[in-house]
Image (cartoon, helix red, strand yellow):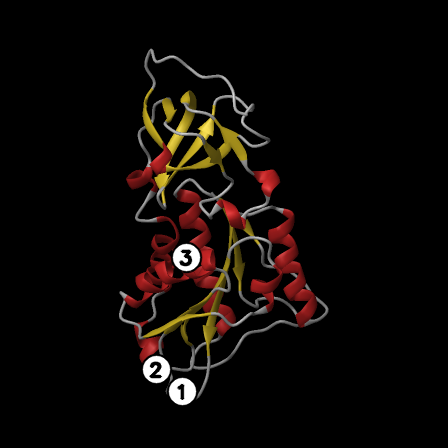
Amino acid sequence: MKFGIDIGHNCSHDTGAIGIKKEDDLTKAVGTLLIQKLKAAGNTVIDCTPTNANSDNHSLWQRVNIANANNVNLFVSIHFNKFNSKADGTEVYGISNASKGIAKSVLKEIVALGYRDRGVKDTAFFVLRHTQMPAILIECCFCDSKIDMDRFDAEKMAEAIKVGLIGESKQDSLISDKDYILEITVPTILKPSTDQASTLLQETLVDIVPGNYPVLDARFEEQHYWVKWSDKTKGNRDEHFVFAGHCKVSEKDDATVTTGTK
């Protein structure tokens, strides 16, 4: 899966809140660790944080443009809240149904660390409105809250976000380290992400007929199988998602191979 990670602020003319700790320092710590963790789990990660900007608006446009240009599957913006030194807790934002589902998963993992659950919210922040893929914005906790800052640990926060996004680990999700056969049991489609097909661009979807197809790699993710094809006749990508209810994955054997899509 390809993630776009936006380390909030950390750019000229775009600086974060200052409380007990600086938001820029907190987002940098969490975002850097999250990128490392997602890569270690076998994902592609695009750092969407700009290095320079002449205004806050320019900074924001650069973030969404990087994500859109790289056609990431999911955009994640990391932030920390500030209010009145008394508010505390975590909230995650998403404006589409797909984004809200992901936001809920991430929020659950962060709340498990002990932070107060402030819910999933749908404020249409700039980076959520202008990205072309599911996008979430995480307010990890409050940088002006003693309760939150006493609890805060960058590594634990990054791990919680990672688990909310992809599950425990690459090892948990991989089928094995061998070649596989993907058995399509009913006519279905190949998708660039686990989102519902109705929310994706039609040109990114590929019809596939029942049959057995050789794949180089596979793992289970959000009720889908992510598969890497051994050839590129399945659309213009060599990696796709297939709904698990429409297929099975097994180790490669002498099964008859189906060679085409429609």
- Check disc 3 and give the amino acid type: Ile
3D distance between C-alphas at marks 2 and 3: 28 Å
Q: Which element type, helix, strand or loop, lies under badge 2?
A: helix
Q: Give the residue number, with chain letter if any, for mark 3.
A: 102
- Check disc 2 and give the amino acid type: Lys
Mark 2 and mark 3 in contact? Answer it, CB < 8 Å. Answer: no
- Check disc 1 and give the amino acid type: Ser
Q: Using the rendered image of the protein, determine whether residue 50 is visible from the camera's viewpoint.
A: no
3D distance between C-alphas at marks 1 and 2: 7 Å
Q: Sequence order check: which comes first, mark 2 or mark 3?
A: 3
Q: Where does the image place residue 28, in percent across and percent down from the top left?
A: 49, 63
Residue 78 drawn above or below residue 180:
below
- Residue at the image point whose x is 45% and y is 68% from the top: 26
Q: Foreground mark, 2 or 3?
A: 3
Q: Where does the image place residue 177, in percent across and percent down from the top left?
A: 33, 27
Mark 1 and mark 2 in contact? Answer it, CB < 8 Å. Answer: yes
Q: Give the residue number, with chain letter if any, for mark 1.
A: 85
Residue 254 drawn above or below residue 142:
above
Give residue 146's mark. 2
